[in-house]
């Protein structure tokens, strides 16, 4: 199996369907979550909804680059999202999240292996491979936060 397929599958594991590393994934944690829980604050932590939107923000931004576009995402905007006020809005967001995550994985999978070692937009950002791996690691980091916040919220009810 070529390395782009392997790395694409690693990305799918954290977002869409895996249980090997964390025994869960974003889809498992969020798919049937009531929107009121997703937007519930716990102390001064980010909400589950904001953390999911944060990861989606980066997926979208990197997808744009993968498709030949510019890198327009900025860290300073990566937590700025409109509030979610209904289950319909939450479900719409989740559908977009899953679709964009699958697009990310498909774009990685279709990438020529040599592309992994090429520079990603600017030298300071490293290679494509480094950015894809960072997206996977970043996603696991916030997945862990989501799991802990859900446990905190369950203890409050």
Image: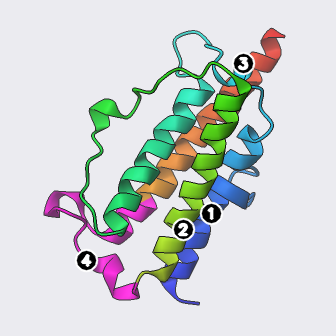
Look at discs 3 and 4 and give the one toward the viewer.
Answer: 3
- Where disc 2 sits, the SS reads helix
Label 4 sits on residue = 118
Label 3 sits on residue = 36
What number is the disc on residue 111?
Answer: none
Q: Choose the circle earlier in sequence order: 3 or 4.
A: 3
What residue is drawn where x is 52% and y is 22%? 46
Out of 146 and 110, give the one closest to the viewer: 110
| Cα separation between marks 3 and 2 | 30 Å
- Where disc 3 sits, the SS reads helix
Residue 80, how many percent across, how many down? Answer: 39, 26
Q: Choose the circle earlier in sequence order: 1 or 4.
A: 1
Q: Which residues are magenta?
A: 112-133
- Where disc 1 sits, the SS reads helix
Label 1 sits on residue = 12
| Cα separation between marks 2 and 1 | 6 Å
Q: Residues within 10 Å of mark 1 (few under 14, many from 20)?
A: many
> How does the figure colour the protein chain or chains?
rainbow
| Cα separation between marks 2 and 4 | 18 Å
Q: Quadrant of residue 65?
A: bottom left
Magenta span includes 104: no
| Cα separation between marks 3 and 4 | 43 Å
Q: Main secondary structure of the magenta part?
A: helix
Contact flag, marks 2 and 1 (Cβ < 8 Å):
yes
Residue 38, how many percent across, how many down? Answer: 67, 25
Label 2 sits on residue = 105
What residue is drawn where x is 64% and y is 39%? 92
Q: Is residue 151 left or right of residue 138?
A: right
Residue 120, how many percent across, how many down? Answer: 25, 66
Q: Residues within 10 Å of mark 2 (few under 14, many from 20)?
A: many
Contact flag, marks 3 and 2 (Cβ < 8 Å):
no
Q: Residues within 10 Å of mark 3 (few under 14, many from 20)?
A: some
């Amino acid at each position: 199996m070529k390395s782009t397929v392997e790395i694409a599958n690693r990305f799918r594991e954290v977002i869409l369907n895996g249980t090997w590393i964390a025994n869960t994934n974003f889809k498992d944690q969020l798919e049937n979550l009531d929107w009121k829980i997703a937007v519930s604050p716990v102390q001064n932590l980010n909400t589950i909804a904001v953390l999911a939107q944060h990861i989606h923000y980066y997926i979208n931004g990197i997808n744009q680059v993968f498709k030949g576009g510019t890198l327009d995402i900025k860290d300073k905007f990566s937590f700025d999202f409109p509030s979610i006020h209904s289950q319909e809005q939450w479900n719409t967001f989740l559908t977009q999240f899953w679709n964009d995550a699958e697009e990310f994985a498909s774009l990685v999978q279709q990438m020529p292996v040599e592309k992994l070692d090429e520079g990603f937009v600017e030298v300071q950002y490293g290679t494509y491979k480094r950015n894809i791996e960072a997206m996977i690691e970043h996603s696991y980091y916030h997945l862990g936060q989501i799991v802990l916040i859900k446990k905190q919220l369950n203890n409050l009810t």
